Amino acid sequence: MKFKTLMLSATSAAAVTLAGVAAHAEDYKVVILQSLTGGAAFIGKNVADGAVLAAEELNEKGFFGEGNQMVFSVEDDATDRTQTLSLITRLAADEDVLMVMGPTSGSVAMAGANVANEREFPVMTTTNSMEVVENGPWSFIMTQPASITMPFIADYTAETLGLERCAIIGVKDNEAYVALQRMYESLITEAGVEIVSQDGVALADSDFSALATKIATSDQDCVFIGTPAAQGANIILQLKQAGLDPSTPILGHNAFASPTFIEKGGAAVEDVYLIGAWVPGGDDDFSSAFAESFEAKMGFPADEWNAMGYSGMQVVAHAVRDAAEAGNLTRDGVRQALGEQKDIPVVVGTHTYSYDEERVPYFGMKVLQVKDGAFTVAPE
Amino acid sequence: MLSQQILNGLVSGSVYALFSLGFTLIFGVQKLLNFAHGATFMAGAFIAYYCTISGLPFLLAIGFSMLATGLIAILIDLIAFRTLRNRGNAEFPALVSSIGVDLILVSIAQQVSKTQVLNFPFGTFPIKFYDLFGLRISLLQIVILAVVAVLVAALIFYLRKTTFGRQVRAVATNERAAALLGVNAQSVYLQTFFIAGALAGLAGVLIGLLFNSIQFLMGEPYMLRAFVVVVIGGLGSVQGAIVASLLLGVTQSLAVAYLPSGLTDAIIFGLLFLVLLVRPNGLFGDINAVAGGTRQ
Amino acid sequence: MIQFYYAYQPIIDFFLLSVGFGYSQQIALRAGVFSIATAGFAALGSYCVAILATKTGVPIFLTVILGTALAAAVGGLLALPLARLRGAFQAIATLAFVQIILSLLLYGEGFTGGALGIVGIPREVNTWILLIVVGLTMYVMWNIGRSGMGRVFNALRQEESVASSLGVNIGKYHIIAFIISGAVGGLFGGLQSLYTFQIEPHNYGFAFIVNVLTVVILGGRTTLLGPIMGALIMAILPEIARPLAEYRQAVNGVILILVITFLPNGVGDEIVFWFRRRKQARQQQHRASEKEARDAVS
Amino acid sequence: MTTLTISDLHVSYGGVKALRGVSMHVEQGEMVALIGSNGAGKSTLLNALSNVVKRKSGEIVFEGRETKGMSPHSVSRAGLLHVPEGRQVLGDMSVYENLQVGLIARGKRNTIYTLDHVYELFPVLEERRDQIAGTLSGGQQQMLAIGRALMGGPHLLLLDEPSLGLSPLITDQVFDALKKLNAEGLTVLLVEQNAHRALEATSRAYVLDRGQIAFEGASEELAGNQAVIDSYLGA
């Protein structure tokens, strides 16, 4: 009895939250469900900010046609699998919601994919994990899997720079970073680069003195660092302080493409190579306009995840509009339209976003280099 | 490379010592595990960081941060420990309530920092390197070693030679007998918490500076390390904690240098297990207890 | 009701799993063992099931049994060194045990998938299975509570010296408590594997330890109702406190402090104790009125 | 002048009534014995005097001041020093350090009991000043416990079973020291199971039986009253 009363009060509390998003016939209801708190907040919060800006702009521009608009709400998956499961389950039970943009990453994204496929409810997770795609036809990924991004930096290592002996530092306790690192290792090994050492740090670590001394005193002609931006900058600082030969090229992946990287690393990260989908400030009309309006709205410059969120929302909006125009404004209609998106203008990569037949996203990458405290496109 | 790694380990170990001393002091006096010690350490780094970026001179920021973490520790005692202690048999309840305090402090720091990794602005402390018999040592490392050595000596002097230190040890050994001799145990508790908090706060600042990184979760690995330190050194033993901290720092450095670095944790926690098996009271648990061994 | 179940099913499942882990934690505390090893047992059980289910053709129900047995065996082994330790040292040693398990899971990439964990575990467990297993676990716990073993555990928790003076072999009962704690932890770890498709070492870290401790502290350390109440509150809290989402951890912290300080027995135990006291009072009253009646007649 | 007055003191331990209306007094300069069988409530009475256990009701007036609500350390700082049963020396600390801790209760009060005085009374403490207290023999620990209390400048010394576990020879030494202290003017309340020794050393005595004063009078008189000794002390 007591149990029931408690559960009922929980239900009504939830109903109040959802009532905020009123439904009209010409409203396209999408929920942006990202990690606003918890371990992946540095991704999810930024993606959500970018996506919200995009949705507002599209509504303002009348993108969906006369009188129509996208109605969106932002929810927090809290980087917590259980809460994600319950939120998506509940959203799936609300027939007005067409799709969810989210959840963010890791096991949370995977959990979201499970429910989505079980309940036939389209989700576009932020992650790049192919397992989400393989989980079923209703779960999509927004970012490019390692098999697409890592060749950019691996080719640059082996061919453009012609390096031969690489030391690798990765994160041991985060699956996304491990996956990127493994991909890089196999690509450069194939290209004939020798891996001289492999070390894993924990995300919470900050003491790299022993590791830095070990690498600074060993023999290699490049160091690849596959960690988050702030941690990577810190590792590079400690490597340089431990006396690493300043001419040794240091390479990283797209996690480094964040203002934090330069801010934390200062002079130590000068000349570091990395890949990024986003060139800060933008590198064509669309992306420059985005950079400007984002900074005007938020008061700080957009980073890679803001740009990703903004781009992802463009794709979602096109899919929703295509479904509506095809007269099939159902979850299944949106799902089909999403998987068929081709050459959507975005602000990241090579500026167009497409899903292939396997629903793998492609928008390209750029090899960047830190020069004079800013990201610039690396010399070919 | 070997001697360089030992040096790295000694520097890390000396900061572990600073961190663990307060933890072991509280255990020595109260026989309670203060799980919020890691969060106090984190708070020290945070407070000094925000003081520094708001323009306070760095030394003043350190002083302010130590004062603040000392007071935080006193609050922890008042909020989480006092009622439980008065009720008796507080060992388990106190662990739980200090975990509660830990969650609160970490959550606040998470909100304040928006989960970002912070670092002291460049130039907060001059980066200079010296070549010492082929060893590369930074000014900061020298300062840290010196500060820790001075503080540890001061703490030992304080516990051994001053009236207050004797009161601390009296309460640690036998609280009731101490009360009958006119020792005010409550004030001893508050003072040991203050000292423990201030030392943890300083350790936080030093770690934040040395490794260039301040974040809301930074306390957790240090808390786990402190468990290793106090078990190997003997819970409540000040000398034991110092020796064990340095040993741990060096072991860890060498493990990273010569073994697969992914195994470091398994190695140090395995070591802890081994010590518990062979010597349940720690390597130095019985002989060198300063803050008191087992309560009579 | 069906609609309700449909919308809240993950919360219900989460609640049932929490209850299971809660019993694993509770049995140790109940016997006076200061253990936080449940996270390690759960990790062992879930990885055993996940590895067997994805890499071999072992029937699913057998994988769960093997996972349970593995965790129980490790629990028994763990008890041997722990029997020599007391209080705080037991807590630290069990924490070290969890850390060792986690770092081995991260390190043994070829076998455990490292940080990536194991994916594609068949989803064989649903609410009904969880409900049945929780029911069975409760039945076993109930029997332990009623048996002599339950009384020995109570004696051990309250005063070890008294128990040993009564000729109780403390070590033996600690080992039994650890084996049960391991078995239950491993069992629900295995079920969790088969429920969530995917597991990673991170699932069994500090957050897990705090959650399962909270369930038992909040609910109660001695009664069957304890973990149920604790898990119920922990499952509902995030739903009704969604506006506090950003401070969820802090809210958990405040709850821990308040409960352990002002309601040291936990919500569930307090409820059971209240009913027991009322029953006793009624019986006394009943006897008194009977006596009165007799007196009046004679 | 009356040093200590106890009126109608009741103390309960978890429902068990340990003291049931005890009234007694100790005059300045007196050495008074409190005797009684095991479990009569002697230690409880001393613990209630030093506020280590809370009383249920009754009054305790020490040097004209009601001690109710004072914490144990304030009571000892006021000059009421309690040498507990089993001596309870600070086992990890040296003899000298134990004596130094004793100083805390003295505060700024003047007293004739200096370190030299204690060393004169118990020369063995000076010989072993750097030894760890836990390694002393039982008799030496008892001397240390008394010496430590003296450092606190007592106006009233409560002694709980000083002869417990000591050889007759050592017991003699301890009692000689107590007599000497009393002769110098120290007020002492002595709890003993060894009734003959206690009565021989003191001027007045109380017999405690099941939480109540069963008999009081001059020690000499009591020592001669074999009937009382047999019925209350079972010795």
Image (spheres, rainbow, N blue to C red):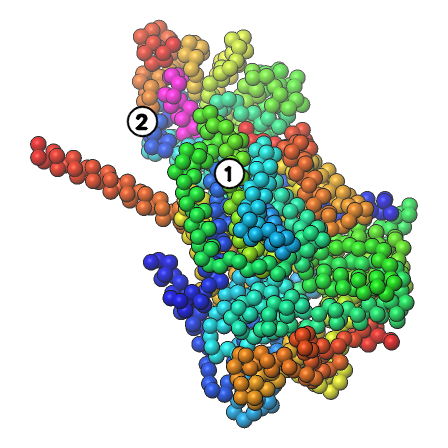
**The magenta stretch spans residue A352:** no
Quick one: label 1, few (<14), some, or many (20+) residues within 10 Å? many
Question: Could you say which is closer to the camera, residue B200 or residue B181?
Answer: B200
Distance between the Cα atoms at labels 1 and 2? 45 Å
Q: Which residues are magenta?
A: D32-50
Q: Position of residue C188 (x, y in %)?
A: 52, 51
SS state under label 1: helix
User: Relative to residue D140, is residue B43 depicted above or below?
Assistant: below
SS state under label 2: strand
* Residue B210 location, quadrant: bottom right
User: Relative to residue C181, is residue D145 depicted above or below?
Assistant: above
Q: Position of residue B66 (x, y in %)?
A: 65, 52
Location of mark 1 (residue)? C177
In this rendering, position of residue B86 left or right of residue C46: left
Q: Chain of mark 1?
A: C
Looking at the image, how many numbered discs can be counted on the residues?
2
Residue B130 appears in the rendering: no
In this rendering, position of residue A80 left or right of residue D27: right
Residue that appears at 80% across and 72% down: A152
Question: Could you say which is closer to the camera, residue D88 or residue B263?
Answer: B263
Residue A39 appears in the rendering: yes
Question: Could you say which is closer to the camera, residue B277 or residue A357?
Answer: A357
Quick one: label 2, few (<14), some, or many (20+) residues within 10 Å? some
**Numbered label attached to residue B99:** none
Q: Chain of mark 2?
A: D
Q: Are marks 1 and 2 in contact (CB under 8 Å)?
A: no
Location of mark 2 (residue)? D20
Residue that appears at 57% across and 20% down: D141
Q: Position of residue B290 (x, y in %)?
A: 65, 33
Label 1 is placed on what type of residue?
A: Ala
**The magenta stretch spans residue D45:** yes
